[in-house]
Amino acid sequence: MRADLEGLEETIGFRFENREILVRALTHSSHVHENTPAAVAGGDNEQLEFLGDSVLGFLISEALIRRLPGESEGRLSKIKAHLVSAAHLHEVAREIGLGQYLQLGRGEEMNGGRSKKTLLVDALEALIAAMYLDGGLERTREFVTHFVLGPAGDDHAMLQEPLPQSVMDFKSALQELAQARKLPQPRYSIVRERGPEHSKTFTIEVRVGREWVGQADGFTKKSAAQKAAREVYQRLVAGAQTGDEARA
């Protein structure tokens, strides 16, 4: 597994000085329990997960205060709750292909541990802690901004919009909005794939009839489709608001 870690480092844009702390962040307790202490001297990732949860919470709170200085505490809390939710972090972990790098015990491996939401979210939080301990807060902030929060120019509009009931599920939100407005149902297609197998980037296009079209990139087809759906959803909402203002 250690030879493959370069692929993960390339994907996240972070080179570890202390490779052992990266290995520990990816080591599940099941792997430790099935091996001798000498074979897994670094231990499992549970303590790093604990630290990573706090580091992530701080960085998200800091970013939201900077980006949305006029928002209420209640609104900021809801946005933060979404960004640190298991559903959202699971998507981030899948985007960077984290599951393939986990060190699991045989039983957990046989039970599909590499795709389990809990294991992936825990490992992502542990990875954030490992980056913080190895490279400091600024380097960790870069990762969180890029993969968890998104650049300000890209996601500011999303943070300003009313959040769908299922915050991250913009595909469902777009489908419901199209149905409510008697528009054709969204249709998704793959525009292109690029990059090596371990770090592919997908471009997905979504169309709602002929007028509403959006494209987005992602490390998985699902994430790219969600981003494309978000783009069209926001434009539909903004269009309706503009129309309401024009009639007022």
Image (cartoon, rainbow, N blue to C red):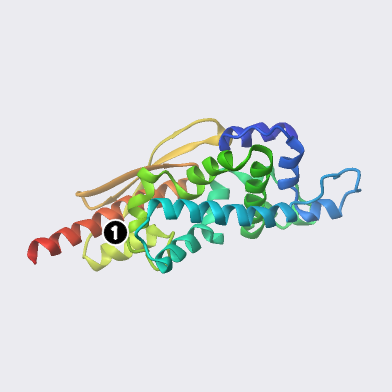
Q: Nearer the viewer, residue 107 or 61?
A: 61
Q: Position of residue 199 (x, y in %)?
A: 55, 35
| Horizontal side of residue 55 vs 29, given as left or right | left
Q: Is residue 176 left or right of residue 182?
A: right
Q: Position of residue 164 (x, y in %)?
A: 37, 65
Could you tell whether 183 is left or right of 18 in the image? left
Q: Is residue 221 visible?
A: yes
Q: Residue at x 82, y 49 (%)?
A: 43
Q: Nearer the viewer, residue 186 or 235?
A: 235
Relative to 246, is 114 above or below? above
Within 10 angstroms of label 1, few (less than 14), some, or many (20 or more) residues? some
SS under mark 1: loop
Which corner quadrant holds the C terminus? bottom left
Q: Which of 75 and 211 lies nearest the eye of the viewer?
A: 75
Residue 237 on image: x %, y %: 25, 59
Q: Quadrant of residue 13?
A: top right
* Residue positioned 32% across, 59% down in the render: 161
Dot 1 corresponds to which residue? 185
Res. 90 visible in picture: no
Q: Indicate the quadrant containing the N terminus: top left, top right, bottom left or bottom right.
A: top right
**Nearer the observer, 105 or 150:** 150
Residue 53's spot in the image, x, y percent? 62, 56
**Count of labels shown?**
1
Q: In the drawing, does residue 166 fall left or right of residue 26? A: left
Give residue 71's quadrant in the image.
Answer: bottom left
Residue drawn at point x = 50 percent, y = 63 percent: 81
The amino acid marked with disc number 1 is: Gln
